[in-house]
Image: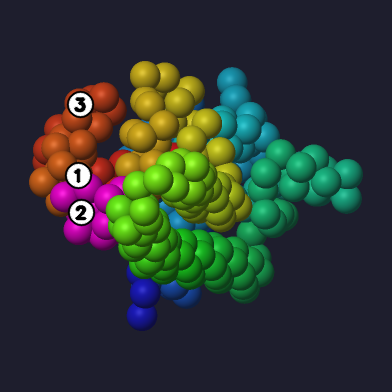
Amino acid sequence: MERYKVFIIDDNVDNLKTFINIFEHHCPQYDIFQTNNPKNAIEIASKVNPQLIVTDWDMPNISGIEVIHQLKSQNETKNIPIIMATGVHITSDDLKVALEAGAIDFIRKPIDPIELVARTHSALMVFQYQKQVIETKDQELTESSLYLVKSHKFNLDMTKRLDELTGIIDSDTNKTKIELRNIIKTFNLRIKEDGWYRFDLSFDKVHKDFNRNLLEKYGELTSTDLKLCAFIRLGMNNKDIASVLNQNPDSVKVSRSRLRKKLAIDQAQNLEAFLAKY
């Protein structure tokens, strides 16, 4: 049975105990994290990386709505599903406010154990489904990239044959040679532009704002750096990346090392996991 991490935010210690008792009794497969200080919620959520957050609405200094806004504004926590819990804001208008803020569900206090378990299970299933969809899309993108490699090699072979043809043509037909070389040049340019355009378009559909989020924090990244980040984000190894970029694996290894320096992360940190936050 898969284990999930559930993070509970509530300033009332008794409420926290209620949540914990229910989960321990009905869902022993969940790892429960808690805080009664909503100001620490963002930091804890970033470190724990839970699959679900349940937050109270009425809390001192910062409300549950504000907590949701902060969580959704951070790359590390923006995709975590959140359930809003409240015993005061229980109207349909309140539900609308919570959902518009970013919550995916709403539960009323006092907490009914069966309802909590059902809503939690539903939220986790949605999270798991979204994760699987992204993984499937990533696999499709990787396959598309490898297809791009094969197509690129074929096109390069064709341009090479055209180039060889210019050496066969009689030396007096300079005009024909010039035209053939122009065709080769145009062909190569179109191959490069069309291939990357298709990849970028597909990648942006799956990982919206990935490049923008990276550039907001690391403005010195080049377009080549961003392409490398995208391939690493997809889990591609150095050999496959080298094939796509028409480089040797050692060059890709050097590029990854330079990228780490630009991102200010050490060799011990997993680069793919780091980029997954964006």
* Lower sequence index among marks 2 and 1: 2
Residue 241 falls within the magenta-colored stretch: yes
* Lower sequence index among marks 2 and 3: 2
Residue that appears at 61% across and 42% down: 56
Residue 73, picture quadrant: top right
Question: Residue 158 in the image: x percent, y percent?
Answer: 39, 62
Secondary structure type for disc 3:
helix
Task: Tell which of 68 and 54 is nearer to you.
Answer: 68
Q: Which residue is mark 1?
A: 252
Q: Quadrant of the C terminus?
A: top left
Of tags 2 and 3, the one toward the viewer is 2
Q: Which residue is mark 2?
A: 238
Residue 68, picture quadrant: top right
Secondary structure type for disc 1:
helix
Whether residue 81 is visible to the viewer of this picture, yes or no, is no
Rendered image: mark on residue 24? none
Question: Residue 63 in the image: x percent, y percent?
Answer: 64, 30
* Lower sequence index among marks 3 and 1: 1
Task: Tell which of 222 and 169 is nearer to you.
Answer: 169
Rendered image: mark on residue 261? 3
Taking the view exactly as shown, the residue that stands out farthest to the front is 172
Q: Are marks 2 and 1 in contact (CB under 8 Å)?
A: yes
Number of residues whose C-alpha sits closer than 10 Å to that of mark 2, classed few (under 14), some (14–19) or many (20 or more):
many
Question: What's the amino acid at mark 1?
Answer: Val
Question: What's the amino acid at mark 2?
Answer: Asn
Q: Which residues are the magenta region?
A: 235-248
Question: Residue 85 in the image: x percent, y percent?
Answer: 65, 49
